[in-house]
Image (cartoon, rainbow, N blue to C red):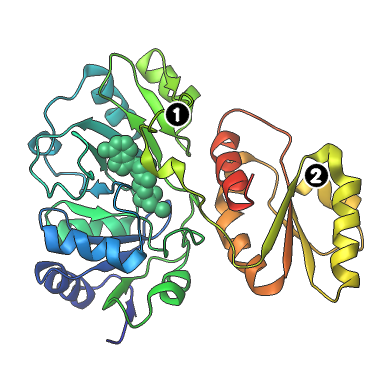
Amino acid sequence: MTTQVLGVSERSLRLAKQYIDAGDVVAFHTETVYGLGADARSDAAVKHIFELKGRPQNNPLIVHVHREFDITSLVDFIPPYAELLAKAYLPGPLTMVYPSSNKVSGLVSCGLNTLAVRVPSSETAQAFLRAVDIPIAAPSANLSKHISPVTAQHVFEDFSGRIPLILDGGKCEGGIESTVLDCTGETPLILRAGLVTQEMIASVAGSCGVYVPKEGEQPRSPGMAYKHYAPKCRTAFFSPEELERAKALYLEEEERGGVPCFFCEDALIRSLDGFRALDLGSSGEEMANRLYELLHRGEEEATLLIGICPKERGGVYEGVLNRLTRAFGG
Ligand code: AMP
Ligand code: MG
């Protein structure tokens, strides 16, 4: 199979619809990362997504719909605070988890009685979702555990020859996966941090918790149990206070003939004169935007990536930190 990479046009949308109607998988741009989409109502199509990615069978998928789609047809109950949040932040990088009404394949939620729904703001995603006009189950378009894709080229590298079409919308501006918000309780609960922050949700909903799995408990957002986003090269992770130790490791790697490279925020770059370094930038949003692209570059260019944890906490930093610690193995 040849994999076509096409921008949005009448022809590419017609092709996308043909592939989706035939039960095939199509990758598409969103404002967070590229998605790997298929008909959420079809067991066979959803199973195909899991097989392509090598994704564990207990890691559920998010259903994507266009902005005019009637979400009440997919879920049992939408609490008033969720309606306020939808008005404030949708379309956008916020996934909301509701009690499912079991209208899509049971494989999407991996047997959970909830359904995660997202309305992406990307024009490419909206054009695709309007063209097919059905709920599309879509995880990130990377092989399981590999770095999430933020360009069509990243998707091509993981799936060339295995999917018929990538709808290219350029670089994903958001850069990290959507915030996943549990909307099944009396107050919203963040299951996965992202660009829509706890502060933003609390300012609309009145309050917002952050889920932390208790020891031994099955996590409510199963994907969070996995090592993820891992580059193919070796990695190490240090706090800013451990910079001298990190430099020693860098020099050791160089002496062994390897290619070490730092991976850190802009404020640290000045103290790394003479060292190779990938610059994450300074604000939380900038770091989210650059994170996966730099990880992809890092794995191409380095034998050892040395991550230094950013200093700030709260807001978008929480989502960035979560991805960083998991990409660098803690
Ligand atoms: P990905 O699209 O690869 O970012 O993965 C989607 C993530 O959304 C999963 O790993 C889960 O953590 C989360 N998710 C999807 N469906 C549900 C659900 N029904 N309940 C809780 N979390 C979910
Ligand atoms: Mg993923």
Q: Name the quarter showing ligand 1.
A: top left
Which residue occupies the foreground of this view, 289 or 325?
325
Q: Position of residue 176 (x, y in %)?
A: 49, 49
Question: Where residue 260 sits in the image (x, y, percent)?
Answer: 79, 66
Q: The residue under label 1 is which amino acid type?
A: Gly
Residue 90 seen in the figure: no
Find residue 169 and name its label: none
Check contact, mark 1 vs mark 2: CB within 8 A: no
Residue at 29 percent of width and 34 percent of height = 96
Can residue 329 be seen at all in this image of the molecule?
yes
Image quadrant of residue 243?
A: top right
Residue drawn 9% across and 39% down?
Answer: 102
| Residue 243 shown left or right of residue 35 in the figure | right
Q: Could you say which is closer to the camera, residue 311 or residue 172?
A: 311
Locate residue 199 relative to residue 248 in the image: left or right.
left
Residue 61 in the image: x percent, y percent? 28, 49
Kindly indicate the quadrant of the structure image that contains residue 43: bottom left
Query: Spatial distance from mark 1 to mark 2, Cα to Cα?
Result: 38 Å
Secondary structure at badge 1 equals loop
Which quadrant of the rendered structure holds the C terminus?
Answer: top right
| Mark sitting on residue 267 | 2
Question: Mark 1 or mark 2: which comes first in sequence?
Answer: 1
Res. 216 mark: 1
Q: Quadrant of the N terminus?
A: bottom left
Most foreground residue, 324 or 133: 324
- Density class for disc 2 (Cα within 10 Å; few <14, some 14-19, many ≥20) is some
Instruction: Say above or below: 139 vs 51.
Output: above
- The disc labelled 2 sits on which kind of residue? Ala
Give coordinates of residue 151: x percent, y percent. Answer: 47, 67
Discs 1/2, front = 1
